[in-house]
């Protein structure tokens, strides 16, 4: 408690306004920086943002940022974070299964985040940093806007924002107003979405806002996976004690149920030693037939099971790969936060305390695994305090931040013949102080400097029970073979799994009789030479303490060429904290660091009928972290974070809006990206026997692998020069919005297209790791009266039913799997505002 009190008294500078809205473009307003929330004259809507901890228009924010209002997000079909690429082309959200999506900005990010992995993109809901990204899937409820910041945010956002930040801002209560909205939506895949919002005054100085949403849809995959069953609730109370003091308190609750993300099977990598015609050295790819590999077939269909059984075996037990465990989701999240705003003379003060909790209980197939199970409890407390003001020509902001997170988890990752059972408790405590100074050299020219000091400590207390089945039957030619010995069933703990096995499989006694359960046990039917296999249990304790101290900073210059034309240049540093893995031989990783140079211009022309923004960027990473599926020192597949080296990221981005006529809006965005790993290397254990020749059982990778013979045989893997992950060279979004008056009513049509060039979506750089180019088309028609609150919208997304891979990797039994973005969806939405 004393730490919380200490953090609460450390005050910083800058007022955040929670009531930012998309202003009506016809309203008058001065085009000056003294009126950040005001309107520029003209036709285009102006979005007010608070990304820099102050209220300003999107066009006045001298940073790389995309923003979209709640109405724009609804029209684009963005109901959770996974669809944000439709409004922020630089952002990719990947969900390979379970509760933890991964976020990428311009090739920087993670494929997925477990209960002890740090994200690369800071996700903030209502001004509160969310440590576990599992808590963000159901946060898109009654939104005011979403802001996507690109590049390091080391000064104002601190740790774990090397790639950028996503700010999700809900609508706040409005004093003295009784209003609300209800909407219902129905579409294919038996999809429905019901939403209700109520804003109610309670006297002159108190307002209440309630919002709720319930949505479901059937699975996109033939096997029923890829469904959704989400519930979200939020309640807010705003109390304005005086014109200079107000408090807003918010509480939210959400659940995510159903089956969860599906996975498709592309084929199997089979061992083909010293075969010059192999797909990669010593491995040949056996493509699945069309009725298996066709997108959205699913791993649980009968034909997929037959193909895998006939082509895949899981070492070291070498028993057929059959019976994937069916996934499920039963996750629950809740939180409470407050925002306290006070004007203390010439100083504006804001304090944001928050507490959040997430309970995960799910199973997924992911990589693919036979089944991975998670049962985690994550709690976090945070408090941020900021103060801001002006001294002559100097605008100042000072702040402090405290974050304390604890995660207790039980996880298991079943790969048929090997299973990793993880029990862990982690704690992370981070304290920061920060400030920003803006010196107004003139009315048009500003110099900006920012500084942040972060002190982080972390600990982990984990137990790993590694279970392996080892086949003892080795024919004269070919690999071992134990078809009569069953692979391991899926269970959350070691005991759960062993209790599902027939005791007759243990002729020398069940491992359950041992205390502790450790060592080697005869397993399977006895043959002429003894047991056919061994069941081996290896426990490992991982107890670590560590921490980081870091100073990050920002230097920038901003110049208003005219009131409607801004140019800016900045240099900013960032860091992502180190951390721990529950992976034998990879227990800890170091921080990563980034230096980012940005040159940008934001412009409004023709009385704000045309907005044209340009950005050029150059990022340099050191010690870059990458979380992905790999191999531990015992040869088992494991998900962990490693420092892979250095990368360079260069590119340009342009976005525009053009109000060609009062009823015709054109919009677009184009990004060119050159993201390359300058240095990307790591070491992986050699799983071959000591009697095998060198370069025999080479890793399944598209990178260069060099045999290391001693002291323990391994491979140095070098992916230097490869493109960064989820980093297409070209991204292009184009759209049109046309409104047609219909005598007391109006019909608004939208048509949007999105092109992305080929990109790598799999960590191993295999021939099956690329996505290919894709082009998607979306359209909608909305009918509403000129006066009145009802509306009807018909929509179709992904018109051509494009199959777009988001993740491709090789899992248990060397089965290559793919997860996809949603297929074609369409429906009708009816709404009423009052």
Image (tube, rainbow, N blue to C red):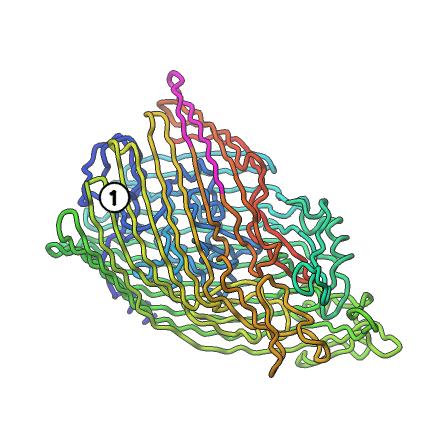
Task: Point out the image quarter for the N terminus.
Answer: bottom left
SS for callout 1: loop
**749 drawn magenta:** yes
For residue 209, side relative to residue 438 (left or right)? right
Nearest the viewer among 582 and 346 is: 582
Residue at image position (24%, 53%) is 15
For residue 124, side relative to residue 133 (left or right)? left
* Residue 445, position as x, y percentages in the image: 17, 50
Residue that lies at the very extreme toward the right in this rendered image: 528
Judge whether 462 appears above or below 48 on screen: below
Magenta-colored span: 736-755
* Residue 271, position as x, y percentages in the image: 72, 64
* Residue placed under numbered mark 1 in the picture: 205
Crowding at label 1, few (<14), some or many (≥20) Cα neighbours within 10 Å?
some
* Residue 795, position as x, y percentages in the image: 51, 32
Task: Point out the image quarter for the C terminus.
Answer: top left
Nearest the viewer among 827 and 608 is: 608
Q: Quadrant of residue 323?
A: bottom right
Nearest the viewer among 438 and 794 is: 438
Nearest the viewer among 404 and 781 is: 781
Residue that lies at the very extreme toward the top in this rendered image: 743
Magenta span dominant secondary structure: strand
Judge whether 369 appears above or below 623 on screen: above
* Residue 614, position as x, y percentages in the image: 32, 45
Residue at image position (64%, 72%) is 635
């Amino acid at each position: 408690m004393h730490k919380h009190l200490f953090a609460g008294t450390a005050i910083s500078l800058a007022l955040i306004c929670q009531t930012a809205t998309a202003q009506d473009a016809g309203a008058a307003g001065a085009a000056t920086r003294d009126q950040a929330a005001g309107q520029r004259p003209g036709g285009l809507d102006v979005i007010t943002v608070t990304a820099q901890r102050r209220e300003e228009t999107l066009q006045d924010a001298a940073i790389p940022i995309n923003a979209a209002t709640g109405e724009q997000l609804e029209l684009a079909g963005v109901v959770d974070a996974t669809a944000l690429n439709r409004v922020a082309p630089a952002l990719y959200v990947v969900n390979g299964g379970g509760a933890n999506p991964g976020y990428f900005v311009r090739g920087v990010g993670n494929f997925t985040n477990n209960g002890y992995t740090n994200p690369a993109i800071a996700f903030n809901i209502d001004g509160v940093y969310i440590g576990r990204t599992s808590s963000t899937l159901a946060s898109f409820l009654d939104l005011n806007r979403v802001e996507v910041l690109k590049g390091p945010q080391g000064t104002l956002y601190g740790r774990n924002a090397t790639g950028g930040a996503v700010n999700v801002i809900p609508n706040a209560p409005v004093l003295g107003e009784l209003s609300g909205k209800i909407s219902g939506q129905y579409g294919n895949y038996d999809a429905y979405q019901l939403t209700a919002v109520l804003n109610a005054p309670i006297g002159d100085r108190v307002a209440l806002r309630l919002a709720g949403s319930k949505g479901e849809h059937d699975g996109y995959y033939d096997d029923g996976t890829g469904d959704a069953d989400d519930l979200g609730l939020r309640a807010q109370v705003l109390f304005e004690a005086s014109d200079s003091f107000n408090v807003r308190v918010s509480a939210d609750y959400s659940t995510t149920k159903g089956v969860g993300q599906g996975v498709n099977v592309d084929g199997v990598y089979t061992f083909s030693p010293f075969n010059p015609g192999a797909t990669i050295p010593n491995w040949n790819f056996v493509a699945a037939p069309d009725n298996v590999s066709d997108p959205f077939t699913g791993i649980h269909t009968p034909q997929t099971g037959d193909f895998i059984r006939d082509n895949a075996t899981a070492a070291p037990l070498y028993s057929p790969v059959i019976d994937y465990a069916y996934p499920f989701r039963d996750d629950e999240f809740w939180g409470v936060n407050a925002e306290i705003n006070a004007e203390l003379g010439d100083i504006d003060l804001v304090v944001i305390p928050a507490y959040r909790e997430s309970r995960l209980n799910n199973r997924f197939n992911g990589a693919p695994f036979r089944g991975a199970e998670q049962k985690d409890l994550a709690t976090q407390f945070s408090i941020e305090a900021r103060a801001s003001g002006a001294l002559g020509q100097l605008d100042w902001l000072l702040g402090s931040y405290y974050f304390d997170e604890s995660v207790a988890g039980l996880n298991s990752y079943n790969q048929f013949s090997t299973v990793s059972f993880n029990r862990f408790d982690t704690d992370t405590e981070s304290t920061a102080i920060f400030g920003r100074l803006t010196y107004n050299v003139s009315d048009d020219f500003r110099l900006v400097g920012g500084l942040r000091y972060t002190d982080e400590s972390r600990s982990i207390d984990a137990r790993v029970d590694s279970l392996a089945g080892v086949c003892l039957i080795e024919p004269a030619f070919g690999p071992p073979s134990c078809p009569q010995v069953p692979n391991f069933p899926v269970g959350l703990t070691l005991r759960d799994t062993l209790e599902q096995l027939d005791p007759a499989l243990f002729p020398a006694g069940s491992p359950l009789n041992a205390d502790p359960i450790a060592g080697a046990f005869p397993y399977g039917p006895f043959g002429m030479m003894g047991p056919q296999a061994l069941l081996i249990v290896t426990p490992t304790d991982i107890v670590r303490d560590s921490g980081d101290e870091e100073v990050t900073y920002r230097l920038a210059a901003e110049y208003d060429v005219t009131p409607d034309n801004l140019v800016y240049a900045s240099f900013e540093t960032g860091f992502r904290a180190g951390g721990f893995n529950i992976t034998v031989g990879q227990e800890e990783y170091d921080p990563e660091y980034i230096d980012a140079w940005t040159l940008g211009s934001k412009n409004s022309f023709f009385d704000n009928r045309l907005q044209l923004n340009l950005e050029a960027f150059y990022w340099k990473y050191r010690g870059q972290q990458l979380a992905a599926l790999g191999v531990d020192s015992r040869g088992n597949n494991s998900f962990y974070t490693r420092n892979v080296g250095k990368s360079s990221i260069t590119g340009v981005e342009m976005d525009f809006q053009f109000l060609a006529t009062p009823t015709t809006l054109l919009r677009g965005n184009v990004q060119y990206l050159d993201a390359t790993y300058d240095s990307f290397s790591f070491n992986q254990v050699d799983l071959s026997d000591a009697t095998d020749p060198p370069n025999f059982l080479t890793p399944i990778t598209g990178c260069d692998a060099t045999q290391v013979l001693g002291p323990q045989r391994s491979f140095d893997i070098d992916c230097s020069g490869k493109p960064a992950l989820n980093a297409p060279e070209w991204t292009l979004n184009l759209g049109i919005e046309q409104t047609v008056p219909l005598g007391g009513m109006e019909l608004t049509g939208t048509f949007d297209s999105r092109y992305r060039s080929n990109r790598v979506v799999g960590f191993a750089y295999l021939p099956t790791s690329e996505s290919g180019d894709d082009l998607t088309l979306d359209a909608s028609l909305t009918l509403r009266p000129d006066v009145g609150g009802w509306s009807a919208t018909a929509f179709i997304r992904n018109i051509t039913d494009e199959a777009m891979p988001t993740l491709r990797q090789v899992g248990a039994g060397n089965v290559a799997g793919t997860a996809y973005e949603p297929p074609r969806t369409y429906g009708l939405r009816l709404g009423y505002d009052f």
